[in-house]
Amino acid sequence: MSSSEQHFRLAEIEVNKSTLDEKIIGIFRYEGESRSKRVPTFLLLVEFQSTSYVYEQLLDVLNATAEQARRLTVQFDADPMARFEKVIQRLNEAIASFVEQSPTPIAWNRVNIFALELSEGHLCFSGTGRLMNAFLQRQENGTFRSFDLFGSLEQPAEPNPKKVFASLVCGDIKPGDILLAGTQNLERLRGELRLIDRLSTLPPVTAALEIQQEIESREIPDDFAGIIIASVLLPKHAEEPLVELSKEKSTESIEHMHEQEKEAEALLSPTIAPVPRGKRSWSPKALLAEIRPSLNKSMTWIKERLKKPKPVPRDPMALASLRGMNAGVGTFMTKRRKMTFLAGGCVIMSALIGTVWYHYAKKASAAQALWNSAYDQAVDRKNRAEADLVYSNEAQARGLVQEALSILTNLDEKTTSRKKAKQDLLTELADVQTKLKHENVIDHPTVLFSLPNDSSGNSRLSSIALYKDTIFTVDPSGQAVIQINPLTKEIKRIGLSTDDSQAVTLTAAKDSVLLETATGTLLSIDPITGKTKLIPFGKTRASTPKAMEYYNNRIYALDPSNNMIWKYSAAAGGFAQEASYLKQTNSNLADSTAIAIDSNVYIGFASGKLTRYLSGVEEVWQPNPADPPIKTVADLWTTPDTDRLALTDPEGKRVIIYRKDGQLISQIRSGDFTGPTALVGDDKAKKLYVVDGSKIFVLDLP
């Protein structure tokens, strides 16, 4: 009989076009052989931005240590994570020893090393620095979700030479999942080489060959290296049928003995050999059939006691004399017979009570066993959910928690022990749900700025931007832009006209702060002098945008009315050359509300939805859902230098932070929030500045 077995297919990409030796790159694979079991595959991905001899020595140390550690742990049958930890520990020790003995210091900002281990159904990795990677997770509907897998690895700001591999991550990799990892220069060609499209539609070897051929055809004077890892199911070899052995005499005698044992068990009473659970009949007829042997024995004993004794020959003379004495007539219910009847009744009652009690105990035991089995299933799902939390597999953890709660709902609380066990498990599941929510409740967040009290209660700040270390926000009621220094809390007011005060959005440009009004005009604000001026804005087809963002000398404007994102290039002291950014999208932008840009473009919607675009094409990107779900996205923030994406949900009265791979990081709540509407972040200071009505709160960026 044949079945399927999970395997990994690996395909390498290697292009050598560099005319200068500026870096050391390589992909090293360590594979072993074992006749008894499948041996894990260990990989080292290396990119050194230098060709100094010390880095060649470091590479030799890594290579030798990885080979030695793999040989020592190849027969280690423990958990894949425990095995990988031993390998990483040896690598850290070897690097630390090398750094102490080396006379030449290592510039760690030039070092990028990642170690991976592939075993059946598992992927473990650790590393320092950054390499290009794209992890495609196959969904049930056949589509793929793209993740920055290496970005999920927590790394210190400065590597510790005594522990270069500071952390590691292990998780499941399922059939259909694909990982591409390689040198950093592949990142800038991600869109041009159609990496995601090729990985999701072609076999790994074909995809690697096409990518390599296209890189070579571009004649780029640089070296490229990468590897594609695909998890697939392959059929096992069919097992040979077993040859039936001829029966010998010893075998026949053993089988005969087993048959005799079965016959003996069938003749024993239910007390000695009870009927298997689930097949016993509870009808009165069946119960009577079971106690019939006991009743028959009791009745036989009673009949023997009541049997009329044979007459004893008597002397006729003695009989006549007795009649003459008038001794009277004897009774049938003698004392002896009364005792006999009483004993028989006791035996019958004892048999009936014992039989009823036995069946009740069996039924109660079966019910308890069924309850325990369901309870154990709920505990198992809780434990698996906690394990998935460790591996950041929150979607699966959330599903397991719901399964456990569904099982517990059907469990009764008839006894004190059952009630306590159920309540304790519900408490533990509630703790897991709390961890999945990633809630961070702040009692009294710091207030950076607040508008004076307004009796009408209509004073509200409308937008916010960060230029270098200065905050800018708009006060429509006061017809002014407010400039705030977060360190000194110094405040300056920049006056606006009535029309200009109806600002749509603020964004920080290269040398100024840009403000677009509801009438479609574009103002430039000098951060030093505070002067404003009208600048040219070549808008012809676009309507008044809902939001705009400055990135790489361009303005990107979100236009829900035309279902478009427009981009404008800097020219002649203003912005012109209006062009459509979107090339392909599956989303209708009619209810879009916010935009944020790094190398990707992120769009938020009034429905709480989030989408991501790259080079004008919508990507397959589904962030993990928040609990409770996001009601509306009012504003978005990110930068190319952070892996965080922050948003405001005014209806939910919270600020939500995601990692760019879709992992939920935190939900910040406070009793002081009335409905956060806008935000901007300072990734260097690790701060968020949040507009909530007439106030600006300062929050720590997790």
Image: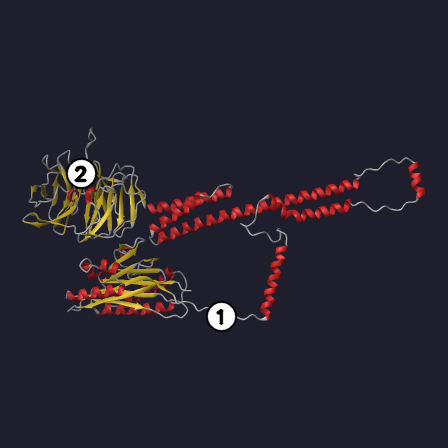
Question: Which disc number belongs to residue 593?
Answer: none
Q: Secondary structure at mark 2?
A: loop
Query: Disc 2 vs disc 1: which is toward the camera?
Result: 1
- Residue at the image position 36 percent from the left and 45 percent from the top: 433
Residue 100 image position (x, y, % from top left): 29, 66
Which part of the image, by quadrant, shows the N terminus?
A: bottom left
Residue 437 at least partly seen: yes
Decide which of 52, 669 is in the foreground and name it.
669
Furthest-top residue in this view: 455
Residue 217 image position (x, y, % from top left): 16, 66
Furthest-right residue in this view: 317
Residue 458 image position (x, y, % from top left): 19, 32
- Residue at the image position 45 percent from the left and 68 percent from the top: 241
Decide which of 511, 53 is in the foreground and name it.
511
Residue 674 image position (x, y, % from top left): 26, 36
* Depicted 360 relative to depicted 325: above or below: below
Q: Which residue is mark 1?
A: 243
Q: Which residue is mark 2?
A: 462
- Colouring scheme, one of rainbow, by chain, secondary structure, one colour: secondary structure
Which three-letter amino acid code belongs to the residue tagged 2?
A: Ser
Which picture quadrant has residue 589? top left
For label 1, the crowd category at 10 Å Cα-Cα, with few meaning under 14, some 14 to 19 and many 20 or more, is few
Left or right, 38 with respect to 508, comes to right
Which picture quadrant has residue 494? top left
For label 2, the crowd category at 10 Å Cα-Cα, with few meaning under 14, some 14 to 19 and many 20 or more, is many
* Depicted 224 relative to depicted 344: above or below: below
CA separation, marks 2 and 1?
A: 83 Å
**Lower position in the chain sequence, tag 2 or tag 1:** 1
